[in-house]
Image: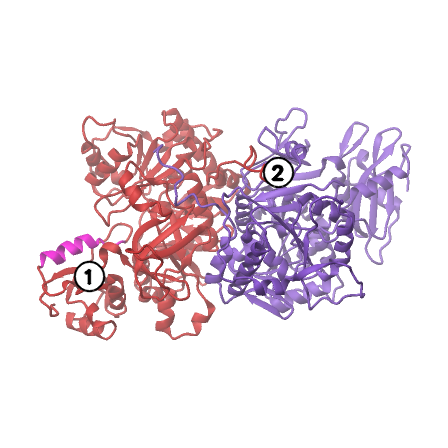
Chain colours: A red, B purple
Amino acid sequence: MEKLGMNSVNACPLTPLGFLERAATAFGGCRSVVYHDVVWTWSQTFRRCLRLASALVSLDVSRGDVVSALLPNVPAMYEMHFGVPMSGAVLNTINTSLDAPTVAVLLAHSGAKIIFADPAFLPLLTDALRLLPPGGQPAPCVILVEDPYYEEESTTTHELAVLTTYEMLLEKGDPEFTWVRPATEWDPMILNYTSGTTSAPKGVVNCHRGIFLITVNSLIDWAVPARPTFLWTLPMFHANGSSFPWGMAMVGGTNVCLRSVDAAEVYATIDRHGVTHLCASPMVLNVLTNAPEGVRRLPATGKVRVLTGGAQLPAAVLELAEAVGFQVSHGYGLSETGGLVVSCVLKDEWNKLPAPERARLKTRQGVRTPVMAEVDILDSETGRSVPHDGSTMGEIVLRGSCVMLGYLNDDKATQAALRDDGWFHTGDIGVMHPDGYLEIRDRSKDVIVSGGDNISSMEVESALYDHPAVNEAAVVARPDEVLGEAPCAFVSLKEACTVTANELIAWSWERMPHFMVPKTIIFRAELPKTSTGKMKKYVLRDLASGMGPTRGSSEM
Amino acid sequence: MEKLGMNSVNACPLTPLGFLERAATAFGGCRSVVYHDVVWTWSQTFRRCLRLASALVSLDVSRGDVVSALLPNVPAMYEMHFGVPMSGAVLNTINTSLDAPTVAVLLAHSGAKIIFADPAFLPLLTDALRLLPPGGQPAPCVILVEDPYYEEESTTTHELAVLTTYEMLLEKGDPEFTWVRPATEWDPMILNYTSGTTSAPKGVVNCHRGIFLITVNSLIDWAVPARPTFLWTLPMFHANGSSFPWGMAMVGGTNVCLRSVDAAEVYATIDRHGVTHLCASPMVLNVLTNAPEGVRRLPATGKVRVLTGGAQLPAAVLELAEAVGFQVSHGYGLSETGGLVVSCVLKDEWNKLPAPERARLKTRQGVRTPVMAEVDILDSETGRSVPHDGSTMGEIVLRGSCVMLGYLNDDKATQAALRDDGWFHTGDIGVMHPDGYLEIRDRSKDVIVSGGDNISSMEVESALYDHPAVNEAAVVARPDEVLGEAPCAFVSLKEACTVTANELIAWSWERMPHFMVPKTIIFRAELPKTSTGKMKKYVLRDLASGMGPTRGSSEM
């Protein structure tokens, strides 16, 4: 038995790139990508990606080089996910809402050789390239991805030297190109910079094996059927759209592209194309479900399935989304895992419970998805598992084949995250319930330490979200003379709703331990968020600090 | 970029065993296994499998030891698929329809330490153990898996020393056992002997990684939804039920067990338990769809999905199954791949074609499943791909991570199958159609070489199956004085149907090139088949040879 093992036949590296080749045969005539009047089939998409890969090779891109994209969810962005790694290069999609200095930092850090850019982001890119440190590596070549459906709002001129356009590049490419298979399944395939809830972006590198596995994991965990119609409401630059670009090729789905998310357009597109599946951050889901009544209508033909993720799914958002007619699944993942690795498997018996209890169970992050090996919550001092009591907080740690290779050129950050104890330390704080379901309580840096008590900002936010007038809420620490820190809530209200700070404090008083009640309530028309819908809590923390310390009593 | 790679967090070996641990949390209260009045939940099944694993360890079973099972599809057989490898051992399920000398050969070859046996097979096992070569390794310990729902037809006594019963063993086991994870994902997990269409069984060894991958492959390719109800019509000893024991734990399905396949019981069970999915060989599907009208009724609540596989799906069987109300998927796989690795992805446009053309397209084996890296058909002389013309025959070859580690203690057979060219040579003969769909034409040893022409026995059989009176057909070579070999057909008829040999020859004459028309037609009440429904063509070939050579004209 010992003599048998890996051999020349079964040692093929795992890679998601082969899904496209298969799709060209199995789903050849089916719609792969739809964008306004553009309709591609799987056999066309395969050939376009081979053209892209071969054209990149002819531009001297070779194995391990970085190719970047500054693109919205247009067809070319989809094609990047196959065409770039099929040339042997590593794909780096860049968050299009970053500012020029940050984009410059990323380009310098990754050493991107080529960048594909949308017309809307040429001014941003122009500024970023100007900010590249002099004397460093050559600036990346720019390839313009023209979009006939983009109406330029101004005639901004840019001074960018554009090498060619995307379609001209493809024209020179070879649709019969033999794509570059990875030498090993551990070869880097994807580079994603973590989005800016902190100020120091890190370059997450995922390999072919990890992407292959998170793709099958995501399909099975969400029970995606054959040939779904998938609406691209989630930016593909956000952890590569949670692996679904590759997943759609595996199951022969149709990718419906969207430049930007506007509630009316989303509902109209769902209707027009018979959309069956979409992903959205809780914030975007909130926008969709709070759209005016005439707009938020779903087709009568079966439920639209929505997958949402992130640290927090407010019960109010979930309930409203279900009332609108979405079938909501949710979970938790990070760029470092390439997609969701914990998800809330719903149980029939929960439906018998009263609504608040049901919502409490359903909004927990859940259990590990099937491909992840292990998930746990560790006491940060002892390093041991916390009791499964639903209240003892600890750090969420993960282990499994979807976890990244590490951070690019950042040994210190890599070692801090991927520890010798065999766990990926996420920096997220959570609890484990007696039924084995995990619940996130906070990012460790967002925990408020008040008079010796740890307050989960998310728990406070969750209670505020339940108030009928509250649209969004974010709670951060504000210095307090007596307690060290005290909770400070930033709140935006729904259209035509009013509520006073005193009323919100009274509301909180009835719904949480009293040490958790915000001492300060600040109303804002809008709260600062990243493009992927995460609160920019560091901005709010700065604002709260700037107000000076509270003095032991509620302030409004 | 080069510095990043496998690390302590992401190097976890892939294994399907973790699916059960997760199922105990995610689907804990849901039905896992149902058998008459026995109903287990996933949390119970997990604990029973841990008990089994710990009990095996306490019986001195250690990593790499072989544990065998001679069981029908009862709950214990399901539990073997997790409990045995969770002890570190390799599971070997034995085809229960083998004869005692063959079982003895397998036990001696595998060196099984323990064998779990059903009461029905104790006489067989008694005989087999008696036939073990003297002076070899110690005979395996026998553990009796009692079955309250098995009515012994006779009071056959056996002289077997039984160590204990299955339930007594579990009672001594530890439900909190820390299961043995594989040291590497290439560790052997499964040993299956190829079933006896040839006389020399070979021991196929699959590893944890291969089984993990064929399991996700099978779920995604068949688009299995969350929490299906799966009826065990396919023996689990047949390539481990095509990987679905592990797949059901991944998606939280319910396993409905069946000791044996009887059409009336199958339809009644489908109705009683709301079965959504089942697997069946084309032969079993033929039996199910030819059941009397009163029996073959499916519930009105949605289609029952059937997955079938093997070398041949006669169009008549497919059509009838669809008429009964089954939604049929089919494909091609081998024990060496652990499940189906080619499957017929149906295309909407085929539905517009006339019935015979549609059936011709739908009964082809299809395209590679998504986890397989590559599939091709090679000319056996040049080793090059055959043209995609639907007519040039060659050997079907496969490459990918689901392919076995090799044959146990059989370097020669391993090297003949897993060649240095990087391909698994299947020994099956097929053609590639212009649309990239593969079609099997024959096992290479079943091809009839007649006057310099290669005749696919399956093509001839397929035309015979289309005749309304024909129940089953098998075509083999019979020596011919002029042509070397000529096709000889063995045919069984449907109940109350008659047809003459002349009529069948005339029927064939109109439906195939004339050199392919059988020269001999032999009617039999039943054709010899293995328990998994494969024709025993070697038996028929011997019969055909025994009749002496044909002399150039049709004979009946």
In the image, is B201 to the left or to the right of B304? right
User: What kind of residue is marked 1?
Assistant: Val
Q: Residue B142 location, x and y as percent?
A: 68, 56
Residue B193 visible (yes or no): no
Using the image, determine if residue B394 lies above or below residue B24.
above
Image quadrant where one finds the C terminus of chain A: bottom left
- The residue wearing badge 2 is B406
In the image, is B418 to the left or to the right of A452? right
Q: Chain of mark 2?
A: B
- The residue wearing badge 1 is A449
In the image, is A267 to the left or to the right of A27? left
Q: Chain of mark 1?
A: A
Q: Residues within 10 Å of mark 2 (few under 14, many from 20)?
A: many
User: What kind of residue is marked 2?
Assistant: Gly
Which secondary structure type mostly characterizes the magenta part of the structure? helix
Give B441 or B97, whichever is nearer the viewer. B97
Tell me the magenta residue range. Answer: A534-547
Using the image, determine if residue A357 lies above or below residue B114.
below
